[in-house]
Image (cartoon, rainbow, N blue to C red):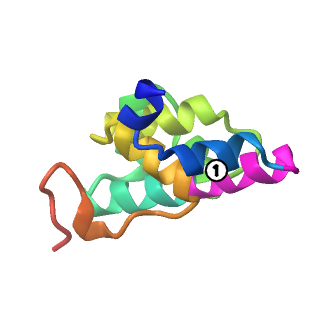
């Protein structure tokens, strides 16, 4: 329970996630939220798809697929890219738990969009 809270989950969100009647939909929503968060975080930091690809050992086309929430891209790669861009486990947990991308003003790293 402590680990879920530390990752940004509330008990209600975790229970709702685990009790989902349609696991495929839940995963698709999580993938979409992670993809949107990735694009937002990358753009806010002025990082190109090419640069992000180099940072994660992948290709620009793979980054484009990640940002498009392509099911061929692993959730692990989406999370890894977010972490490379400065996301914490709590940030990732909030995105997955809410199914939405947090407003840009709430970025923990102090970077602001110019």
Q: Position of residue 42 (x, y in %)?
A: 35, 54
Residue drawn at point x = 36 percent, y = 53 percent: 48
Quadrant of the snapshot with the C terminus: bottom left
Q: Position of residue 106 (x, y in %)?
A: 25, 63
Residue 60 in magenta? no
**Total residue callouts:** 1
Residue at the extreme bottom of the image, as rendered: 114
Whether residue 113 sits left or right of residue 53 in the image: it is: left
Which secondary structure, mark 1? helix
Residue drawn at point x = 58 percent, y = 29 percent: 76
Residue that label 1 marks: 30
Span shown in magenta: 21-33
- Dot 1, crowdedness within 10 Å: few (<14), some or many (≥20)? many
Q: Nearer the viewer, residue 46 or 50?
A: 46
Q: Position of residue 56 (x, y in %)?
A: 43, 29
Q: Determine if residue 82 is in view.
A: yes
Whether residue 42 sits left or right of residue 95 in the image: it is: left
Whether residue 96 sits left or right of residue 81 in the image: it is: right
From this view, report whether residue 46 is shown above or below residue 93: below
Residue drawn at point x = 84 percent, y = 46 percent: 24
Q: Nearer the viewer, residue 61 or 86?
A: 86
Residue drawn at point x = 37 percent, y = 46 percent: 91
């Amino acid at each position: 329970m402590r680990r879920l809270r530390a990752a940004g989950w509330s008990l209600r969100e975790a229970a709702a996630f685990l009790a989902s009647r349609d696991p495929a939909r839940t995963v698709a929503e999580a993938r979409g939220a992670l993809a949107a968060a990735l694009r937002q975080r990358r753009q806010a930091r002025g990082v190109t798809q090419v640069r992000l690809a180099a940072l994660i050992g992948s290709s620009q086309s793979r980054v484009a697929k990640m940002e498009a929430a392509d099911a061929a891209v692993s959730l692990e790669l989406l999370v890894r890219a977010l972490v490379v861009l400065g996301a914490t486990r709590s940030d990732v947990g909030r995105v997955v738990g809410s199914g939405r991308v947090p407003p840009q003003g709430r970025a923990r790293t102090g970077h602001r969009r110019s």
